[in-house]
Amino acid sequence: MLRALDTSLLLTPNEVAAYSPAVKTAGLKAGLWSATECTVSPRQTIPQLAEYLEKELDVVFQFGSAITHVDTGILSDFYDIWRAERIFICSGADFETLYPRIFQESGITKCKLQMLRTNTQPNSWQLGPSLCAGLTLLHYSSFAHLKSLESVRDRYNQENPDFARYGVHVLVSQNHSGEIILGDSHEYGWDVSPFDSEEINQLILNYLQTFAQFPDAVIAETWHGVYPKLPGKTDFVMEAEKGVWIVNGLSGAGMTMSFGLASEIV
Ligand SMILES: Cc1cc2nc3c(=O)[nH]c(=O)nc-3n(C[C@H](O)[C@H](O)[C@H](O)COP(=O)(O)OP(=O)(O)OC[C@H]3O[C@@H](n4cnc5c(N)ncnc54)[C@H](O)[C@@H]3O)c2cc1C
């Protein structure tokens, strides 16, 4: 009997199968299940979040303009000037427009991630919880203190050193349209290539098929995202001028951590 209210459980392969029909249980030793994971679909959430903030908190959004100049108490998009007591610059991976020298000196870099999406799965098929497997234990530093991780690393380096070279680990989730979202890879550097590598997409799919399968595996869409990464740090917060704060560098955890950081800073 599964205790659904526990926050995390060690599951037998049969129990894993009860949580998700996608998991390949042949050869599986065990699974970890967490009740605190939450999947957010950015295409749905971001417009809804803006709508919510406009309605509930009278936030005014000014889409489609780039701020090109900031100083204490003022910001401007070349045409108009706004005044504000406190200014927070959350410019993501755009290090070039505002305070480029500060970004250059900070040690921050960019990370390019390749992603894939299937079509809507047939017959309302449900993935269940989001899935990941062994490579994910190597990717997130929360697991870095585990001594047993070395043998996991050795195993994957022997199986395919390209997993480590391209920072591949696989997260599988399903969105509100029934599509399966798959990713990702991690390539670091200020110059982000606009061209995606089919080899990397295949690495992601090859690893995926070692632990999961879906009724419709056809890939409908591929793309890449870019986020800022400050190695060894969880964020980059700096007062660039009096009352002007740069808040950046949330890396691959911004969807999770940014609300906490915002409430701490504001
Ligand atoms: C593929 C991918 C998968 C991810 N998966 C996860 C995940 O599973 N969990 C998680 O927690 N996080 C995840 N993240 C990370 C998360 O998306 C980021 O940490 C988060 O989006 C950072 O938020 P931000 O507001 O700092 O920057 P961004 O979301 O990058 O927003 C910055 C915005 O500022 C705008 N801007 C820049 N310069 C200017 C200017 N001069 N004037 C006006 N506007 C400007 C940009 O156009 C952009 O809209 C993922 C990121 C990617 C790319």
Image (cartoon, rainbow, N blue to C red):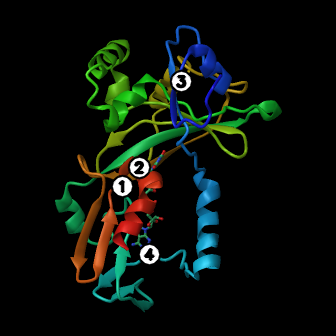
Ligand 1 under 8 Å from disc 4 Cβ: yes
Residue type of the residue flagged with mark 2: Ala
**According to the image, label 1 marks what residue?**
250
Residue type of the residue flagged with mark 1: Leu
Residue 77 shown left or right of residue 171 in the figure: left
Marks 1/4 in contact by CB < 8 Å: the verdict is no
Say which quarter of the image contains residue 12.
top right
Residue 253, disc: 2
- Residue 22 location, x and y as percent? 65, 23
User: Disc 1 or disc 4, which is closer to the eye?
Assistant: 1
Residue type of the residue flagged with mark 4: Ala
Q: Which residue is drawn at 30% across and 22% down?
A: 149
The alpha-carbon separation of the residues under discs 3 and 2 comes to: 22 Å
- Residue 183 location, x and y as percent? 50, 36
Callout 2 secondary element? helix
Callout 3 secondary element? helix
Residue 10 shown left or right of residue 121 in the figure: left
From this viewpoint, which residue is outermost toward the top? 27
**According to the image, label 4 marks what residue?**
66
Residue nearest the observer in this picture, 154 or 114: 154
Say which quarter of the image contains residue 152.
top left
User: Disc 4 or disc 2, which is closer to the eye?
Assistant: 2
Q: Which residue is drawn at 53% across and 24% down?
A: 208
Marks 2/1 in contact by CB < 8 Å: the verdict is yes
